Image (tube, rainbow, N blue to C red):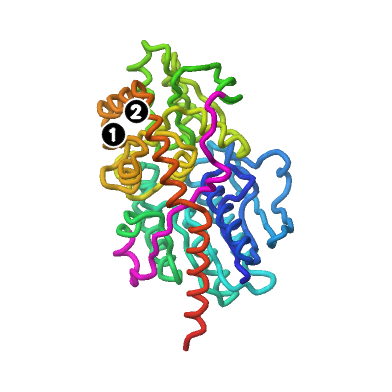
Amino acid sequence: MRITVICPHFAPDTAPTGQVITEIVRELQNLGHHIHVVTSLPWYRNHSVEDGWRGRLFATEKTSWGRITRIHPFISNKRTNLLARAIAFALFSLVTALAASIGRRTQLILAMSPPLTLAPAGWIAARRHRAPLVLNIQDVHPDAAIETGTLNDERVIGLLKRLEIFSYRKADAITVLSRDLKERLSNRVEDESKILVIPNFVDTERIYPAEKHNSYREELGVTDETVVLYAGNIGFSQPLEIVLEAAQHLAHRDDILFVINGNGSRRAHLETASEEIPNVTFMDYQPNSRLNEVLACGDIHIIPLKPGLGSISVPSKLYSILAAGRPVLASVDPGTEIDAVVTQSGAGRSVRAGDTEAFIAALEALIDDPNGRAAAGLNARHFAEEWLSSEAIGETYNNLFFELLEQRKSP
């Protein structure tokens, strides 16, 4: 089958969604499909186009499984304001639609959101190729932007909601990561049967339990200390103040180090807020080749989400942590997918989003229970191997694609 994949990031870009779609493409390649990926030039690490890719509006490359078209994201740097980012995403999506529409006919379009503007880009390409459109939802927009407070203009919200409904109506199938997301979308889609729950997967061969004493830990300057690690985007969805409060509470202990690994719009603010907290260290994004090393370094991994976001987003970092066999402490809405996965799998602990006192108490309990952490790590790895294999998820997408093609053939 000839498939066109439209996505905001793709390897070697470091964005979590880029890693997800790269793995999906790898599995589709293994199943014999010919794939055209239309994506951006790598820019996620510092929110600017990376060295080696600058100075061009697009780049193309042939692969053993098809080809990749990379387009300039039109975002200048990580301080770009919301309006400028919206214009950039719209312009990127327009050029993406054109790139996905030209060339030999494709049989299916897979488009990833966010950004929401890639959904109509996928629809344009699907119309051009007379192909089914599968819309992959990683976060529900504009809900996520509204919940984090980054979007409050009623006119813009109304416009985006209309774009959202239009996108769902034009898609032949909509894939979401959890039952929470399906329930949230059920009253926005005219035919709920179009919504399928397909979780993100993780490559359990590339990410695996490893020795925590490695070069990354050496860079941190620690040996046997307990490393409490947050690795990921530092933005408005992640209330990392709760981590700083925990670090402040435990500052009297010299056997604990809090590490925040990543970049984002709120990093500078958090670095300033942590200047007087001695047990907090910030690290930049690491290359994908070091992902397993970074994950192995953490004795406890933190996943915090603002209240109200637990049913909108399932961070892909959760699955990587589980595959690495490390315990998780989640601060999320009760009853949501992250809460259920962490608690039911035995991979760690989950407390109510925003409950700082419960968060600190749960963290102290994990720090002082190394045997419990080891057991949680084993449970995490077992869950990843049994439920999150890339082969199983790739086969699910493959079956969906052929089902849609058969439906097109039916009178």
Does 297 sit above or below residue 236?
above
Q: Read off the residue under disc 2.
A: 242
- Viewer can see residue 398: yes
Tell me which corner region of the image, top left, top right, bottom left or bottom right, holds residue 341.
top left
Does 289 sit above or below residue 198?
above
Residue sitting at 47 percent across and 25 percent down? 259
Please state the horizontal and vertical placement of residue 390, each as a whole percent of the image: 52, 54
Instruction: Verify CB contact (< 8 Å) between mark 2 and mark 1.
Output: yes
Mark 2 residue crowding within 10 angstroms, few (<14) / some (14–19) / many (20+): some
Residue sitting at 33 percent across and 71 percent down? 190
| SS for callout 2 | helix
Q: Amino acid at mark 2?
A: Ile
Does 213 sit above or below residue 70?
above
Side of 208 where 145 appears, left or right: left
- Mark 2 or mark 1: whose residue is earlier in sequence: 2
Does 144 sit above or below residue 166?
above
Mark 1 residue crowding within 10 angstroms, few (<14) / some (14–19) / many (20+): some
The stretch of residues the image draws in magenta is 185-213
Residue sitting at 63 percent across and 61 percent down? 29
Q: Work out which quarter of the rendered image holds the N terminus and state it.
A: bottom right
| SS for callout 1 | loop
Decide whether the magenta segment is chiefly helix, strand or loop. loop
Residue sitting at 45 percent across and 21 percent down? 272
Tell me which corner region of the image, top left, top right, bottom left or bottom right, holds residue 258.
top left
Q: Which mark is residue 354?
A: 1
User: Residue 196 or 135: which is nearer the viewer?
Assistant: 196
- Real-space CA distance between mark 2 and mark 1, rounded to the nearest whole angstrom: 8 Å
Check residue 198 for magenta coloring: yes
Check residue 44 for magenta coloring: no
